Image: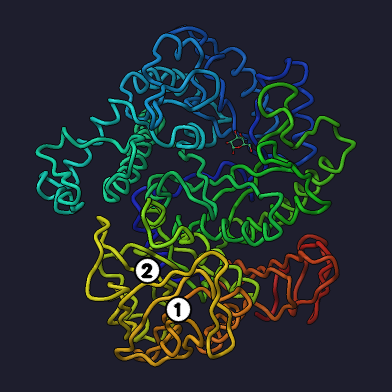
Amino acid sequence: MTGRPGFESAAADLPAARSFPWPADGLLYGGDYNPEQWPEEVWAEDLRLMTEAGVNTVSLGIFAWGLLEVDQDRFEFGWLDRVLDGLHGAGIAAALATPTAGPPTWLLRRYPEVLTVDAHGRRNGPGARLGWCPSSAVFRDRATKIIEALAGRYGDHPALGLWHVSNEIGNENARCYCDESERAFQGWLERRYGSVEKLNQAWGTAFWGHHFREFAEVPLPRAISGHHNPGLVLDFHRFSSDELLEHYRFERDLLRGLTPDVPITTNFMVKPTMAPVDYAAWAQEVDLVANDHYTTAADPDRHWSLAMSADQARGVGRGRPWLLMEHSTSAVNWQPRNRAKEPGELLRDSLTHIARGADGAMFFQWRQSTAGAEQFHSAMVPHAGTDSKVWREVTRLGEHLGALAELRGSTVEPASVAILTDYASQWALTSWGKPTVELDPLDLPTTLHRLCTRRHRQVDVIGPDADLAGYRVIIVPMLYLAYDTLAERLTAAAEAGAHVLITYFSGITDQAGRVITGGYPGAYRELLGVRSEELHPLLAGETRRLDNGWSVSSWTEHVHLTGATAIAEYADGPLAGTPALTRRAVGAGSATYLATRPADDHLQVLVDELLTLAGAAPVAEAEDDLQVVRRRIGDQGYLFVINHADAARTVTSSGLDLLTGQPHIGTISVPAGGVVVIKETNV
Ligand code: GLA
């Protein structure tokens, strides 16, 4: 048993999913290394401490462009030669960055036209990072020069393990509204629609008389007094994601031509919040999915959110092992209040990513900066030095990852639950003019992920085009757009025994944003056996009761049964006596429609009922508060158990705890805040 057949075969089909020499034995461990911020005397200590901590990989040169190309076409590589030689001598691999995330000041002064323009027409100034327009031909030209110089110099360096293209592309340059972007957008639309008539039809430009006679008339959705056509807004998001991806591809293809054997990646920002780009599409273009994740200090559910981010990172890569390229050892410095991590939180966070499929854990950054915008952001070597909680946990994590080296090559075992999400649906749902401002596309996916995960079920977070075979429960949570063949594939999955849960405001419009008529939810009426005639969002603070005692808020709608039966009806309000929760038997499975937003406790009741109905087995028998995940190589299981509670909790498993070397049989007590990784016997 090595994984879900569909999941794996999908990965094998990916053109870029080639096998490559892994940069180090076992799991990767390290962080962003910025030696240019320090005098050379410190570099020797860096290497000594990296060795002490078990570091085997560092991301290097991410923001070093201005120190490598000190003036146009004048390169100074001497210092980086010495850094790379030193790393090689210490047996540490470099994920060497193309430094395009940090264009030099001279470049931005000489070519200000590369800088992005905001929706109000204001050009960004020099001073931060990224900030360039992905459609800029001048920027591409300058990027070509530095990349050719870098690859020419280091392509054969023995320390080079991986190319790290730019950094979080789209973070500070997600959307550009300059004239060059507008022309690129028009070209993108022409390629997508073929004729301007088709575009007019798709967006419904007859509304407000927006009809375009030629692509050259289509504007970017700049700031205006009023509201743009939602189809235009959605396509601008898609275009921006594609344009940024095009920049990544340009760097990747340049590197591949120069150094065909070196694997290439770029660090994503996959997390359960809105993303500027479509990472499911991007994941098909990298040799290795690399992700950055930071917890939100003020969020009491941050460990659940982290678990979902890790499941998403695995999901965009269709189950392939991935790399946690950045997280933090303790506080960040960009939230309103930057709480230090509790003792043990670093280890729990890192090992949660590893449990959920990461083959390495790296940090931003190696040594805490004394100057610059991130001087109060934690690092592996803190301002306080090595006599510190952070350093002790950093070295402990290094030992743990060393003890887990044999996990390299294993994968997370097949999940029983799938949650379907898609970036385009999120963008479409958040454009102006929907029935209520409470339609948060992230609410139901994250809540339902947590409610399944806390019941110890393994969840895959996948796109609407993923293979659905084998899942016991498939959840479609407020997936606003309709997708070709998805209704048919959900129906086939239900007929084969899956239990499908579709929530309100899913399948409402086609891919261009036009509503599917005849009753909501247009795409899934037949599968669900319901027809909803009118949407009844609730006012702020308003609630309704259902006849099963549940309390609901935010959303109701007027549903008619056309084949389904009502499981619960509204007990009060104008829709009293009409269905709020329905189910239709479909083959060996079923299709459930949730037409309202129950309180979380009541949603948990629905989740529990569905998991039982579907026979979705827990990963292991475990007490509440434990997160439980199994990775496997062949028949060998590795059970990760992470205790977020402030008291010990028990799980049932037998085998050797790889972190302590202690054998266990039967009931295992996981200490408060602790982690065990059991190399299982008899499973
Ligand atoms: C991102 C960036 C890093 C750093 C961290 C801080 O992940 O990639 O350069 O700014 O955030 O949390």
Figure quadrant, ligand 1? top right
Q: Position of residue 570 (x, y in %)?
A: 48, 85
Of residues 117 and 323, the one drawn nearer to the viewer in this rendering: 117
Instruction: Give above or below for 447 relative to 168.
Output: below
Q: Position of residue 61 (x, y in %)?
A: 57, 25
Question: What is the total number of numbered labels drawn onto the structure image?
Answer: 2
Dot 2, crowdedness within 10 Å: few (<14), some or many (≥20)?
Answer: many
Q: Quadrant of residue 561?
A: bottom left
Q: What amino acid is labelled 2 in the image?
A: Ser
- The disc placed on residue 366 is none
Position of 603 with respect to 264 (left or right) is right
The kind of secondary structure element at disc 2 is loop
Image quarter where the C terminus lies is: bottom right
Task: Tell me how far mark 1 sits from mark 2, CA to CA.
Answer: 10 Å
Instruction: Give above or below for 335 relative to 588.
Output: above
Q: Position of residue 526 (x, y in %)?
A: 27, 82
Position of 495 with respect to 340 (left or right) is left
Q: What amino acid is labelled 1 in the image?
A: Leu
Q: Are marks 1 and 2 in contact (CB under 8 Å)?
A: no
Of residues 578 and 460, the one drawn nearer to the viewer in this rendering: 578
Position of 348 with respect to 76 (left or right) is right
Of pointers 1 and 2, the one earlier in the residue sequence: 2
Give the residue furthest to the right: 387
Residue at left offset 73%, top offset 42%: 337
Position of 521 with respect to 658 (left or right) is left
- Does the closest atom of ligand 1 sit within 8 Å of the Cβ of label 2? no
In the picture of the structure, the residue carrying the numbered disc 1 is 594
Q: Quadrant of residue 92?
A: top right
Of residues 43 and 629, the one drawn nearer to the viewer in this rendering: 629
In the picture of the structure, the residue carrying the numbered disc 2 is 506
The kind of secondary structure element at disc 1 is strand
Residue at left offset 30%, top offset 81%: 531
